[in-house]
Image (cartoon, helix red, strand yellow):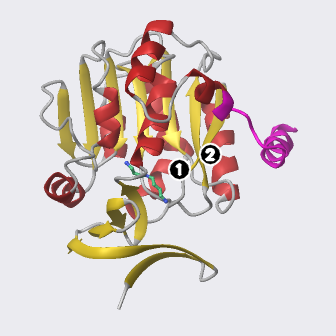
Amino acid sequence: MAIWYDEVFEDKIRYGLKLKRTLFVGQSPFQKVAVVETEALGKALLIDDLWMAAEGEEKVYHEMIVHPALTTAPSIARVLVIGGGDGGTVREVLSYPEVEAVDMVEIDGMVVDACKAHLPEIGTAWDDPRLNLVIGDGIAWVKDASHGLYDVILVDGSDPVGPAVGLFNRDFYEACAARLKPEGVLVTQAESPKLFFDVHVDLVQVLRQVFGHADPFYQTMMIYAGGLWGWVYASRQPRRFEIIPERLAHAEARCAIYNGDIHRGSFAVPTYIRRALAAKERP
Ligand code: SPD
């Protein structure tokens, strides 16, 4: 009999994949962690029974969380990644020779261990000497870091339940803004505007208030609830389209999804979201 795994959204919608086998299941102090092999998308990571990354689709997510920031930030020497325990985000960051040091702070060592053991195809940069992997609380790390330390901060958390709740609030982003250089760029994953509309719109609004400039961008993700996935690009100066040609050429040569047209097009905002953001900006 076929075994399927379904991520269930509010007892109303299911996002399912047929499984070949289960490779790992564990309960960490923070959450349930599982790695399964699916028929359609290869091996996949689940956290608290929610799809996080699958071999056959992870490039969409990891290329989009990394390259819009790294092709536009004036400097990319020092990068902070919060979360990202499967290693896909640091893999993309470390592909740039100009990156000198990456601090990656992941709260759950079980996620990293399970992904190193069962998903080495995603995390291919664990041994890069520029990577400082810290198993710890990313929120505390940001608060303790020196001001103006980072060129780029990428927030690759899971959904706003459990340990990732704090990655969706204003205090956290104020602390991030202070730890970025004045010309630095922050990108955070921002859930689906289809199913997490208020979370998504509120996050854009908070980042606009904290940084001065913040814009959502989108791609489709077949295994994430809602299908249309959002990230937010935040900076003190409007620089999301200030693409540096040499960096774009580097990204285009390695990426499966990201390119200059995708970069520009992904910032097109559907009208219903534009209206919600405009309404929030009215005094
Ligand atoms: N509902 C899925 C949210 C996923 C956010 N992070 C994914 C981690 C991939 N590195």
Within-10-Å neighbours for mark 1: few <14, some 14–19, many 20+ = many
What amino acid is at disc 2?
Answer: Leu
**Closest to the observer, 178 or 17:** 17
Q: Is residue 129 magenta?
A: no
User: In the picture shown, does residue 50 fall above or below 260?
Assistant: below
User: In the picture shown, does residue 106 fall above or below 11?
Assistant: above
**Closest to the observer, 261 or 135:** 261
Give the percent coordinates (x, y) of residue 121.
23, 47
Determine if residue 144 is in view. Answer: no
Give the percent coordinates (x, y) of residue 14.
56, 76
Q: Which residues are magenta?
A: 265-283
Determine if residue 260 is in view. Answer: yes
Magenta span main SS: helix
Q: Quadrant of residue 233?
A: top right
Can you identify the residue that label 2 sits on?
A: 203
What amino acid is at disc 1?
Answer: Phe
Q: Is mark 1 within 8 Å of ligand 1?
A: no
Can you identify the residue that label 1 sits on?
A: 168
Q: Indicate the secondary structure of the residue bearing disc 1.
A: helix
